[in-house]
Amino acid sequence: MTLNLDAPLNTPVLYIVFKRLDMVMQSFEAIRKAKPPKLYIASDGPRKNNEEEIIKVNSVRKYITDNIDWECEVKTRFREINAGCNINVTSAIRWFFENEESGIVIEDDILPNRSFFYFCEELLNYYRDDERIMFIGGMGNKDDAGNEKDLEIAGNYHFIKSFHVWGWASWRRAWNKFDLNCKYLDYFLKENIIFKTVHNAESLKRFLTMFKILYDSRLNRDFNSISWDFSVCYMMFINNGLSILPNFNLVSNIGHGHQEGTYSQNEQYFIEERREISEIIHPKFIFAEDDYNIELNSLTTELENSRSTIRQLQDALDKLLEAYALIGGKI
């Protein structure tokens, strides 16, 4: 299947932003060039008593709305109060799929190339009614080498059991299965249900670590303490779902090392050079690749440890600012 990158895009896009204007100026430019027919913009609100953040959030919103220069239907969801990454993002996605049967989701620190949009659009149509497939991602570093016959059989994309958060697409049918509370997670862990779907020891170790972190956060009702994609991975496991990833990166994470980011400094995997894809070769077999899951989830766990430390520091700073405001800004 040859992709026509000059054809009009027919797929709606959800763009999730916060306060990083430098990131938005790059990622929104990619969306602007793709010209989606419908654009949903979700922006979290500034944190309480943070005047600097109010200015940054409003600057991002103004930049986007001022630069929509193609014909499209625009819907916005601008929060006045900060909800936190987990709740803000998942509720924005719910809002998106309440209005659309399928679509592409991009966060502000994700820079897709043009072919990413058409890759997603083609596979959204191709797997529209295949309940096994729940998500389509834009990042991958699987070796694309091999002779022409290998590529004809293996294709130029592959399947994993996990979920890749940086640039993705899905369907309403898949997101309807999402549960922020992760009901039955205790039973899932107690009964070792994960052993029924994962058979590689290293993959088991990584996924169990992920789900135990998720369980602790839900037990404490602390939804914003960990990344929202952990709960999406749980949703995939209990539904025996699969994600699609290309064999090479179609997007890059430009938030790597950003002063206001929450990611580790060891993300070379996620910032490798992007390549355009001009043709989609569908694999002849549909199965998850455990070796790839090992690498992906090792990095995911590492990133979560970094995020937790930074969030703890941010929470402490927020409490200090609130206390400072209560005494009238005087010491």
Image: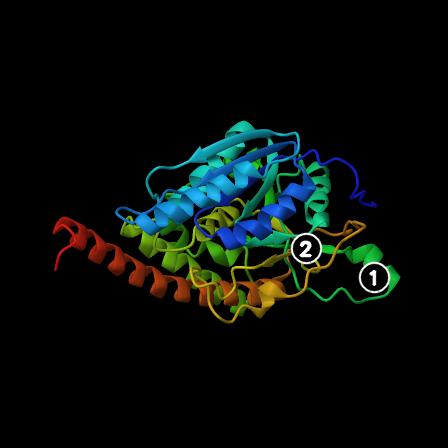
Can residue 178 be seen here? The reply is no
Q: Name the kind of residue labelled 1 in the image.
A: Asp
- Residue at position x 49%, y 62% in the image: 300
Name the secondary structure under disc 1: helix
C-alpha separation, residue under disc 1 versus residue under disc 2 = 21 Å
Seen in the image, is 211 located left or right of residue 124?
A: left
Along the line of sight, the residue nearer the viewer: 35 or 250: 35
For residue 250, which numbered disc appears in the image?
Answer: 2
Q: Nearer the viewer, residue 95 or 129?
A: 95
| Mark 2 burial class by Cα count in 10 Å: few <14, some 14-19, many 20+ | many
The kind of residue on which mark 2 rests is: Leu
Most foreground residue, 71 or 243: 71
* Horizontal and vertical percent position of residue 104: 60, 41
Left or right, residue 114 beside residue 293: right
Quadrant of the image for the C terminus? bottom left
Q: Nearer the viewer, mark 1 or mark 2?
A: 2
Q: From the viewer's perspective, is residue 23 above or below residue 5?
A: below
The picture quadrant where one finds residue 314 is bottom left
Residue 82 % position (x, y): 34, 44
Indicate the position of residue 189 as horizontal and vertical percent values.
39, 55
| Point 51% across, 29% down: residue | 98
Q: Are marks 1 and 2 in contact (CB under 8 Å)?
A: no
Image point 35% across, 54% down: which residue? 215
Q: Residues within 10 Å of mark 1 (few under 14, many from 20)?
A: few
Looking at the rendered structure, the number of numbered marks drawn on it comes to 2
**Residue 231 against residue 175 in the figure, above or below:** below
For label 1, the residue is: 150
